[in-house]
């Protein structure tokens, strides 16, 4: 989209102790403001804004200069806003916000850019400001597939949240996860993350801010009666996140924009006490790239899992790893028991995407094979389209 220089139309009128202002921008942005300031009594401020395919590119100089760096890749020339913003208030006693009143926002962000994908998003806000406290009755952000809902309060002096944030799947309303916030003024808040899919899984911690646009925190991850304490640091201007779990685990990633890239290093990290790898220790370096649920990959040149107990023996496992949304490759798996006996194997899968496979009860087309070599013997297992092939 190529925009010509927009035409501004501004009007200002004053009646005694009242002021009225209007701003119109190329019929795509209209703002009306009425300000009453009597010599005695309570004043009032009313602001209403209407946007109709208002291009964010018009605000590009301001976004580039003032907005956090990670927001800039999410819009382009075609990105535009449709909707209304209304603020009705009276003179209050706040020092940050001198007016108390209700704020309503109903916006649609169209043709937003997320990596190579364009999508639309909706934003609805209902809240009230009183004595520098913002009471959020409902804040909803919805995109194709997901809906995020927040309700709670925040003090405008420190902007520490207090409330609950829920993430839902749009197609069936399934709750995916929740975050509860608890403010601890002046510059800290606690949080707890839970999911209905695994009741034993939770993340609890405390976050504090610093003048360098940093959020610093300490937390613990709990799953299957195993607790992992860790520390983290988030650069809010770029959404760069780093996590460290003592000397056993570290993660460095960017949370936006897609692709999300992550480097993970493990050094003797003890796995949870559940399943085939219960209490085993994992070491190695792993790289993750995520564009969306249908375009991602996980790779490692060498992963080592030690202390795997199976049928009275203890094994260590070494393998390279390559996983995408529709394939798995473990080209050379080396199993070594406590006597030093080695078993070589390999595993591969190609075919339908894992999301499709799960939805169709593993009846979608795929091809998988497993090979095990021991004492000059070779055993093969082949699966095709969900059926066992041959040994």
Image: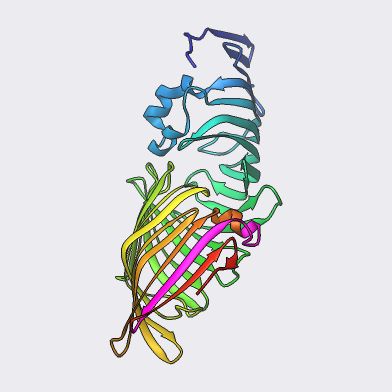
Residue appearing at x 50%, y 37% in the figure: 96
What is the quadrant of residue 242 in the picture? Answer: bottom left
Percent coordinates x, y for residue 286 in the rendering: 34, 60
Percent coordinates x, y for residue 388 in the rendering: 57, 69
Q: Residue furthest right?
A: 172
Give the camera-side residue of 70 and 62: 70
Q: Looking at the image, can residue 181 be seen?
A: no
Decide if residue 26 is on the left or right side of residue 220.
right
Q: Which residues are magenta?
A: 358-375
Give the camera-side residue of 367 and 338: 367
Residue appearing at x 51%, y 73% in the figure: 223
Q: Is residue 353 above or below residue 30?
A: below
Residue appearing at x 47%, y 30% in the figure: 75
Decide if residue 339 is on the left or right side of residue 209.
left
Residue appearing at x 36%, y 82% in the figure: 374
Q: Is residue 143 above or below residue 355?
A: above
Q: Looking at the image, can residue 208 be seen?
A: yes
Residue 359 on the magenta span:
yes
Percent coordinates x, y for residue 377 in the rendering: 37, 81
């Amino acid at each position: 989209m190529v925009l010509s220089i927009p035409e501004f139309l501004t009007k200002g009128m004053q009646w005694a102790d009242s002021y009225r202002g209007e701003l119109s921008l190329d019929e795509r942005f209209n703002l009306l403001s009425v300000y009453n300031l009597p010599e005695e009594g309570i004043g009032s401020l009313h602001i209403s804004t209407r946007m109709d395919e208002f291009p964010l590119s018009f605000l590009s100089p301001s976004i580039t200069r003032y907005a956090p760096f990670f927001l800039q890749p999410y819009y382009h020339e075609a990105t535009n806003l449709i909707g209304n913003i209304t603020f009705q208030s009276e003179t209050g006693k706040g020092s940050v916000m001198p007016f108390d009143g209700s704020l309503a926002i109903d916006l649609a962000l169209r043709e937003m850019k997320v990596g190579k994908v364009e999508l639309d998003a909706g934003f609805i806000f209902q809240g009230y400001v009183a004595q520098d406290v913002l009471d959020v009755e409902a804040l909803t952000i919805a995109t194709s597939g997901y809906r995020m809902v927040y309700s709670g309060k925040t003090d405008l002096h420190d902007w520490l949240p207090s409330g609950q944030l829920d993430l839902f799947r749009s197609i069936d309303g399934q709750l995916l996860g929740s975050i509860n916030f608890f403010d601890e003024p002046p510059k800290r808040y606690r949080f707890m993350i839970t999911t209905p899919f695994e009741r034993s899984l939770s993340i609890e911690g405390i976050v504090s801010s610093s003048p360098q646009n940093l959020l610093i925190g300490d937390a613990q991850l709990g799953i299957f009666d195993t607790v992992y304490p860790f520390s983290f640091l988030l650069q809010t201007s770029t959404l760069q996140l780093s996590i460290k779990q003592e000397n056993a685990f570290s993660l460095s990633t960017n949370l936006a924009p897609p692709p999300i890239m992550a480097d993970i290093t493990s050094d003797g990290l003890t796995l949870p006490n559940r399943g085939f790898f219960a209490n085993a220790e994992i070491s190695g370096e792993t790289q993750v790239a995520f564009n969306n649920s249908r375009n991602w990959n996980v790779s490692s040149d060498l992963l080592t899992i030690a202390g795997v107990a199976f049928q009275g023996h203890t094994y260590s496992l070494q393998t390279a790893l390559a996983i995408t949304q529709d394939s798995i490759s473990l080209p050379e798996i080396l199993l070594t028991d406590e006597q030093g006996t080695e078993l070589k194997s390999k595993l591969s899968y190609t075919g339908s995407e894992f999301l499709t496979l799960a939805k169709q009860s593993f009846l979608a087309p795929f091809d998988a094979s497993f090979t095990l070599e021991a004492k000059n013997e070779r055993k093969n297992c082949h699966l095709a389209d969900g059926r066992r092939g041959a040994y």
